[in-house]
Amino acid sequence: LPQGATPKVQLGACYGVLAGLHALAGKLGLVAALGPDRPAKLALFMIYARIAWQGSRLGAVRWAEDHAVAEVLGLTTFDEDDLYDALEWLQANQERIERALAPKIEPGATFLYDVTSSYLEGQCNELGAHGYNRDGKRYKKQIVAGLLTDATGEPLSIQLYPGNTSDPKTFQPTVEKLRLRFGAKDIAVVGDRGMIKKLGKEALGAAGYKYVTA
């Protein structure tokens, strides 16, 4: 600088947090599983923003203004509507993504399955319905979620159901998912006594699976 000149400092976009998360997602196979399309990159951004920012979709868009989204993910301008469209894309591609991320299932493996629910304050949700409410909100609509994991609790698949779906009715589709989507053979499935009932046991028997329950 010329003598007496005042240096000007300009702060660029924050690079490290997105670059670090993106590198980790690559090592975990998440980047390859989602693919190179723009909706996949938006989905990755939402994952990173959820970890680093933990705000709303609109908040994530504003957070992106200070971060190197273009440099790390190759994403140009986007808004919250684009993120909601990416969620629709994720739903349409869920089966493919789960299959790509699933480990090779060896005979003798054990899988855990359980169900929970989440109540809604609003009314406009296609899965929202009145059912057994674990939150104690007896007059609120809810949705039901079934989670399938491996023996260590690592998630393998998640599925949402209408809020009035009973636990056993979610179990039979899960057995079929293990058989058809993941090609599992000679395995055991663990679930509580309210889960594995007559239809579930029939589905397990047809698939040649063992089970553990209370």
Image (tube, rainbow, N blue to C red):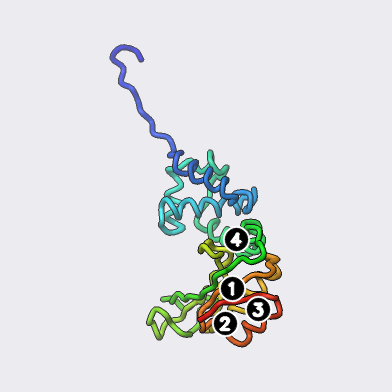
CB under 8 Å between discs 4 and 2? no
Q: At which x and y percent is residue 141?
A: 46, 81
Q: What residue did someone put label 1 on?
A: 189
How far apart, in angstroms, are the residues tagged by discs 1 and 4? 27 Å
How far apart, in angstroms, are the residues tagged by discs 1 and 2? 9 Å
54 w.r.t. 74: above or below: below
Closer to the camera, 168 or 210? Answer: 210
| Residue 90: mark | 4
Looking at the image, tell me whether mark 1 or mark 4 is earlier in sequence order: 4
Looking at the image, tell me whether mark 4 or mark 2 is earlier in sequence order: 4
Closer to the camera, 42 or 102? Answer: 102
Q: What residue did someone put label 2 on?
A: 196
How far apart, in angstroms, are the residues tagged by discs 2 and 3? 9 Å
How far apart, in angstroms, are the residues tagged by discs 3 and 1? 9 Å
Identify the image quadrant of residue 175. Answer: bottom right
Looking at the image, tell me whether mark 3 or mark 1 is earlier in sequence order: 1
How far apart, in angstroms, are the residues tagged by discs 3 and 4? 29 Å
CB under 8 Å between discs 2 and 3? yes
Give the crowd class for mark 2: few <14, some 14-19, many >=20 residues within 10 Å. many
> What amino acid type is highlighted by mark number 3?
Leu
> What amino acid type is highlighted by mark number 2?
Ile
CB under 8 Å between discs 3 and 1? yes
- Secondary structure beneath label 2: loop
